């Protein structure tokens, strides 16, 4: 949509072909329906791929300020929240889809939904696009088909196939920003609980990734923004453990002191109430039971156990056995090789007049609005540069 708008702004005649029944179905589901549309800190340091620096030129040409000012122009008011995350003021992702739709209409972009581009080729200077038994000519083409992630919201592999048909190569694809499956049944008993934690991925006893933020316990394992952020390290490089520090602001010694104070001041309470007031009650009880301690034991008998529990709360560890896959992932790590595209125009180095942008390329961002910023920036650059003739997106 952003690419189509930029191309139209250049004066091109633009046709936007969308395989789903409506525009922006995935966009409408982003940020838990709130759409975290960008992040104040967007820069190449927050992106991954074989060559993450590929994204720098687009992010510079169409950065966060420029993006927000374009959205403001379209009528979208936004608000900044923690960690520089930016959302629509309405708190509804649909607002973003709506202002884009209105802008496409105002710019004269023709939109055809329910249209799957099945193939395309270039003969001489002109492209031919095939869909539903029809063939259409185009001077330039922008492939903005997204990636494999979010299968239930329409994530498909069409973009990779269309670009591969021109000789482009795709790297190995992995789900990224994804929920983790963990061994055992402890998380099942905690299902639905959200807590703040410092999350570390441990491999061979060494921390290889770390992120603070919200963690959600689920039937199958762990979810939440902090888990998404470390999921790449947790599943891609062999066996790992995810350890939650449930009291990141306290040292083990300080936590031990607090537990001791609880025992001294409330000796008649039972172990199941040791963490009451410090953690969600069910989480406190599960911590105690997973240390093999009976919840009905009086606190007065807990001597010697408090240190063990303080250490457990600072390192509540889970063996990672996998992730929930592309259907549940927020983004695809990997994609069409960026070395085959010009970073300042998004034009193919293999086929002139062919452009690509967004998730279909081998660039993926951290959790926090970075993936949509990449889609906006690369889409805008692709549209600007493609829009110098008649364009079909
Ligand atoms: C649940 C979820 C939540 C997310 N939340 C956030 C968030 O809050 N912030 C953030 O930055 N990122 C978020 N993301 C990631 C972000 O949505 C994507 O990275 C981004 O949408 C990619 O943009 P894109 O334009 O490249 O692809 P898409 O948004 O996937 O758009 C591609 C479009 O092309 C269409 N298409 C595909 N093949 C064809 C074809 N053959 N013919 C015609 N049309 C075709 C698709 O139907 C789709 O509408 C989230 C993703 C998911 C799944």
Image (tube, rainbow, N blue to C red):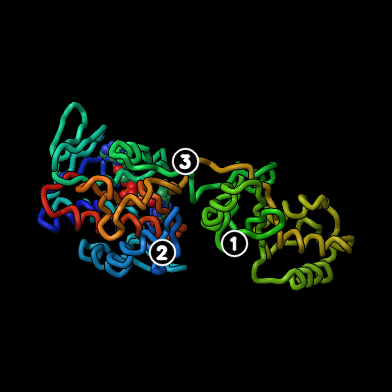
Alpha carbons under labels 3 and 1: distance apart = 23 Å
Quick one: label 3 or label 1, which is nearer the N terminus?
A: 1
Alpha carbons under labels 3 and 2: distance apart = 24 Å
Residue 98 placement (x, y as % from top left):
25, 52
Q: Quadrant of the C terminus?
A: top left
Quick one: label 2 or label 1, which is nearer the N terminus?
A: 2
Question: Which mark is drawn over residue 195?
Answer: none
Query: Residue shown at 33%/36% (left/top)?
Result: 161
Alpha carbons under labels 2 and 1: distance apart = 19 Å
Mark 3 or mark 2, whichever is nearer to me: 2
Query: Residue shown at 41%/41% (left/top)?
Result: 148
Q: Which residue is mark 2?
A: 44
Q: Which residue is mark 1?
A: 210
Q: Dot 1, crowdedness within 10 Å: few (<14), some or many (≥20)? A: some
Query: Residue shown at 22%/38% (left/top)?
Result: 113
Left or right of 376 on screen, residue 316: right
The image quadrant of residue 208 is bottom right
Residue 130 placement (x, y as % from top left):
20, 32
Query: Residue shown at 60%/43% (left/top)?
Result: 181
Q: Secondary structure at mark 3?
A: loop
Residue 313 placement (x, y as % from top left):
72, 60
Q: Which residue is mark 3?
A: 326
């Amino acid at each position: 949509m952003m690419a189509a708008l930029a191309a139209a702004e250049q004066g091109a005649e633009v046709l936007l072909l969308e395989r789903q029944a409506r525009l922006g179905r995935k966009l409408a589901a982003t940020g838990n329906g709130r759409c975290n549309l960008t992040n104040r800190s967007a820069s190449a340091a927050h992106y991954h791929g074989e060559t993450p620096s590929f994204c720098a030129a687009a992010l510079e040409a169409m950065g966060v300020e420029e993006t927000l000012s374009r959205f403001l122009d379209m009528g979208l008011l936004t608000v900044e929240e923690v960690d520089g995350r930016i959302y629509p003021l309405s708190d509804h992702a649909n607002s973003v889809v709506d202002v884009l739709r209105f802008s496409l209409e105002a710019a004269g972009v023709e939109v055809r939904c329910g249209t799957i581009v099945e193939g395309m080729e270039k003969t001489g200077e002109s492209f031919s696009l095939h869909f539903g038994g029809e063939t259409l000519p185009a001077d330039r083409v922008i492939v903005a088909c997204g990636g494999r992630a979010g299968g239930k919201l329409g994530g498909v592999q069409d973009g990779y196939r269309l670009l591969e048909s021109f000789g482009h190569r795709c790297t190995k694809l992995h789900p990224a920003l994804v929920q983790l499956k963990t061994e055992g049944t402890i998380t099942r008993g905690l299902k639905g609980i959200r807590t703040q934690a410092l999350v570390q991925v441990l491999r061979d006893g060494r921390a290889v990734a770390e992120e603070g933020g919200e963690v959600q316990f689920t039937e199958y394992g762990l979810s939440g923004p902090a888990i998404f952020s470390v999921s790449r390290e947790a599943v891609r490089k062999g066996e790992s453990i995810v350890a939650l520090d449930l009291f990141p602001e306290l040292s083990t010694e300080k936590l031990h002191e607090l537990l001791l104070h609880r025992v001294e001041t409330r000796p008649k309470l039972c172990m199941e109430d040791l963490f009451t007031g410090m953690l969600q009650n069910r989480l406190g009880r599960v911590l105690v039971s997973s240390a093999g301690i009976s919840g009905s034991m009086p606190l007065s008998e807990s001597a010697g156990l408090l240190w063990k529990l303080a250490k457990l709360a600072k390192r509540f560890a889970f063996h990672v056995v996998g992730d929930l896959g592309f259907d549940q992932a927020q983004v695809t790590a990997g994609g069409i090789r960026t070395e085959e595209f010009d970073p300042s125009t998004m034009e193919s180095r293999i086929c002139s007049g062919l452009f690509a942008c967004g998730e279909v390329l081998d660039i993926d961002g951290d959790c926090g609005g970075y993936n949509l910023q990449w889609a906006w920036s690369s889409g805008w650059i692709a549209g600007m540069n493609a829009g110098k003739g008649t364009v079909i997106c």
